[in-house]
């Protein structure tokens, strides 16, 4: 499961090029994004919260 989580994080940081938003990488990137996305970006924040919650299980 960790390999899948890392792959998602890698895709977002490198392929989607969100890596410039933070120095945090791997699974911690997903958690960090869920915490730092402003509340007015409801759908984006919800997406990262959902992925982050999945990671916790």
Image: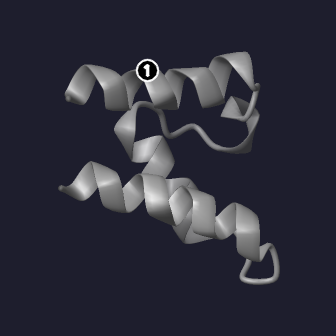
**What residue is rendered at 50% in x and 40% in y?**
24
Query: In the rendered image of this protein, does residue 51 appear above or below residue 12?
Result: below
**What residue is rendered at 48% in x and 47% in y?**
30
Quadrant in which the N terminus appears: top left
Between 43 and 14, the one lying in front of the other is 43
**What residue is rendered at 65% in x and 67% in y?**
45
| Disc 1, SS | helix
Q: Percent position (x, y) of residue 51?
A: 45, 52
Q: Percent position (x, y) of residue 53?
A: 34, 62
Q: Quadrant of residue 6?
A: top left
Q: Quadrant of residue 54?
A: bottom left
Residue sitting farthest toward the right: 40
Crowding at mark 1 (Cα within 10 Å: few <14, some 14-19, many 20+):
some
Q: How many discs appear?
A: 1
Residue designated by label 1:
7
Between 36 and 42, the one lying in front of the other is 42
Query: In the rendered image of this protein, does residue 17 appear above or below residue 53?
Result: above
Position of 6 with respect to 15 (left or right) is left
């Amino acid at each position: 499961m960790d390999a899948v989580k890392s792959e998602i994080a890698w895709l977002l940081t490198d392929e989607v090029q969100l890596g410039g938003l933070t120095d945090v990488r791997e699974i911690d990137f997903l958690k960090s994004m869920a915490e730092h996305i402003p509340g007015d970006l409801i759908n984006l924040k919800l997406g990262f919260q959902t992925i982050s919650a999945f990671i916790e299980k």
